[in-house]
């Protein structure tokens, strides 16, 4: 060993003035401390860099579904204000939705399958979808279903699983892997544009209200347009009003009232609590499903928008729910939905179809008006209802229905007002247009 090495060794082994600790020990401690501090600083730098990067990419879009009650100055009247704040308790808004303000499209859009199809079709028309779908992922709570999964759930879309056929498509009962019961609706038409379908599903998919059927997800592949919906297990209002063979209807007055109020709340939510609002466009008794507590869930909202307007007019006209201005101009507004609601209320009270050609007065609206004018209000209730409502209660609900079918759409109430009227106990029955009810 050389003399310099020996002297270095001596110095390292020599105790220092720092608690008599040997020099080499102090050296090791210093190197260790230096390494740890360097590591901590590097780590902090990385974290800071990542945070900055993610906040930059947190791109915000205008939100299509924003509770209007969150906007100051939205409510047009103090009545609406009260109604909307009360309605909020009915709305199953979870905090996640509010956090999602500014985010629009589901990860389904961003899937190679969906985005590939979008590019194949008119991508230019698509605008926001094609622009943002790549950036915004994992937003709508709707699940991404594969065709295989839905085939398994519905037993290969078997006849045994078939629930029924409607104007929009064929509905199958299904059970998902996690045992959730669903209704899988296969739309008959593949006439609409893929992007229109996706955009509409995205709007409908955000809707969460106890009186509206939830869209859990959807699937597009080849000619398949599949909607996966919450399963509602007690058939439709149409069934219980018109297809139930029992002499006494299980729909008592209080059940009917609950159904009317539930439908009103669901519709008010679509019209007044979300943005953009959704017009139902085919509010009819077969689109009101019931659960075992007779709570109504409105289905098929917004679907008619996908189809040719003529088609919607024909259906609503043939069934007797069409508002006069919609029939004459083809323009559908919120007030056209409210007209259909009025007809629906009349159907629920009387048990008569909106158009019954076997009657001298086939249209329920005309018949009811003539009965009211002839002071025969007590005779309008469904004969299958054993326990009749009090005259006061009946007048209250009838007045609401009559106001909703006012030929002048401007005079029809908003749905928020309807809810309020339905809940008022001591309504003054004075109305210039229905003077006989006073
Ligand atoms: N989510 C659901 N849960 C349970 N049954 C459903 C559900 N959606 C639809 N159905 C049932 O499936 C059948 C077909 O429904 P669909 O909505 O396609 O047409 P519809 O209700 O008969 O009327 P329309 O097409 O004229 O609106 C009906 O018997 C309906 O009650």
Image (cartoon, rainbow, N blue to C red):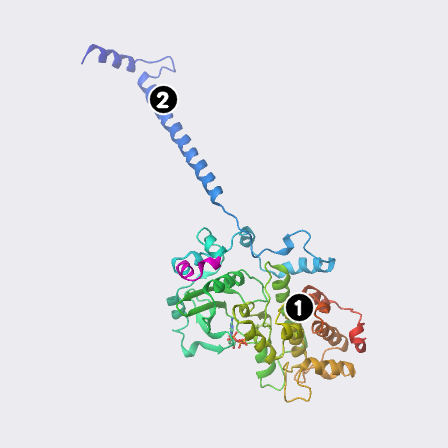
Name the mark nearer the viewer: 1 or 2. Answer: 1
Mark 1–mark 2 contact, CB under 8 Å?
no
Kindly state the secondary structure of the residue where label 1 is placed: helix
Specify the farthest residue to the left.
1
Residue 87 highlighted magenta (yes or no): no
What residue do we see at 64% from left, 66% from top? 334
In the image, residue 155 sits, relative to residue 359, either above or below, namely: above
Q: Which mark is residue 372?
A: none
Query: At x 52% / y 62%, what residue is drawn?
Result: 205
Q: Secondary structure at mark 2?
A: helix
> In front: 67, or 291?
67
Q: How many marks?
A: 2
Splitting the image into 4 quarters, where does residue 402 fall? bottom right
Which residue occupies the foreground of this view, 191 or 53? Answer: 191
Q: Earlier in the sequence, mark 1 or mark 2?
A: 2
Which residue is at 73% across, 80% downward? 369
Which range of residues does the magenta coloring cover?
Answer: 115-126
Residue 324 image position (x, y, % from top left)? 66, 75
Decide: few, some or many residues near mark 1? Use Cα within 10 Å; few <14, some 14-19, many ≥20.
many
Cα–Cα gap, marks 1 and 2: 80 Å
Answer with the quarter of the image where residue 240 lies.
Answer: bottom right
**What kind of secondary structure does the magenta stretch mostly adopt?**
helix
Q: Is mark 2 within 8 Å of ligand 1?
A: no
Instruction: Say if disc 1 is inside 8 Å of ligand 1.
Output: no
- Say if residue 105 shows up in the picture: no
Find disc 1 in the rendering and name its residue: 335
Residue 260: x %, y % from top left: 65, 72
Q: Position of residue 210 (x, y in %)?
A: 58, 65
Whether 364 is drawn above or below 130: the answer is below
Identify the residue under disc 2.
Answer: 30
Q: Is residue 272 above or below residue 254?
A: above
């Amino acid at each position: 060993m050389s003399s310099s090495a020996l002297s270095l060794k001596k110095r390292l082994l020599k105790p220092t003035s720092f608690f008599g600790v040997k020099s080499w020990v102090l050296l090791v401690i210093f190197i260790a401390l230096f390494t740890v501090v360097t590591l901590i600083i590097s780590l902090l730098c990385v974290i800071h860099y990542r945070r900055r990067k993610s906040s930059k990419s947190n791109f915000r879009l205008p939100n299509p579904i924003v509770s209007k009650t969150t906007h100051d100055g939205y409510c047009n009247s103090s009545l609406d204000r009260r109604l909307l704040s009360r309605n909020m308790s009915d709305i199953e808004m979870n905090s996640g939705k509010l956090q999602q303000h500014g985010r629009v499209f589901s990860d389904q859009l961003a899937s190679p399958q969906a985005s590939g199809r979008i590019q194949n079709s008119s991508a230019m028309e698509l605008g926001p979808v094609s622009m943002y779908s790549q950036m915004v992922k994992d937003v709508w709570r709707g699940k991404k279903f594969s065709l295989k999964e839905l085939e398994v759930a519905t037993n290969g879309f078997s006849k045994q699983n078939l629930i029924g056929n409607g104007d929009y498509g064929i509905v199958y009962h299904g059970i998902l892997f996690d045992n959730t019961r669903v209704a899988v609706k296969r739309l008959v038409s593949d006439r609409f544009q893929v992007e229109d379908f996706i955009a509409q599903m995205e709007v409908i998919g955000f809707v969460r209200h106890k009186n509206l059927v939830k869209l859990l997800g959807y699937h597009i592949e080849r000619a398949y347009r599949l909607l996966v919906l919450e399963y509602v297990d007690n058939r439709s209002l149409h069934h219980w009003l018109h297809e139930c063979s029992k002499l006494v209807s299980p729909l008592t007055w209080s059940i009917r009232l609950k159904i009317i109020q539930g439908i009103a709340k669901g519709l008010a939510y679509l019209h007044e609590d979300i943005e953009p609002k959704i017009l139902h466009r085919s509010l009819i008794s077969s689109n009101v499903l019931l659960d075992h507590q007779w709570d109504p869930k409105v289905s098929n909202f917004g679907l008619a928008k996908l189809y040719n307007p003529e088609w919607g007019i024909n259906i609503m006209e043939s069934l007797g729910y069409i508002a006069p201005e919609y029939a004459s101009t083809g323009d559908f507004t919120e007030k056209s939905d409210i007209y259909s609601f009025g007809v629906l209320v009349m159907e629920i009270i009387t048990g008569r179809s909106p158009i019954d050609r076997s009657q001298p007065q086939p249209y329920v609206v005309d018949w009811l008006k003539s009965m009211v004018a002839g002071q025969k209000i007590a005779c309008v209730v469904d004969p299958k209802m054993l326990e009749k409502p009090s005259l006061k209660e009946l007048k209250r609900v009838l007045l609401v229905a009559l106001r909703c079918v006012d030929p002048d759409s401007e005079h029809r109430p908003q749905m928020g007002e309807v809810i309020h009227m339905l809940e008022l106990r001591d309504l003054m029955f004075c109305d210039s247009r229905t003077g006989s009810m006073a």
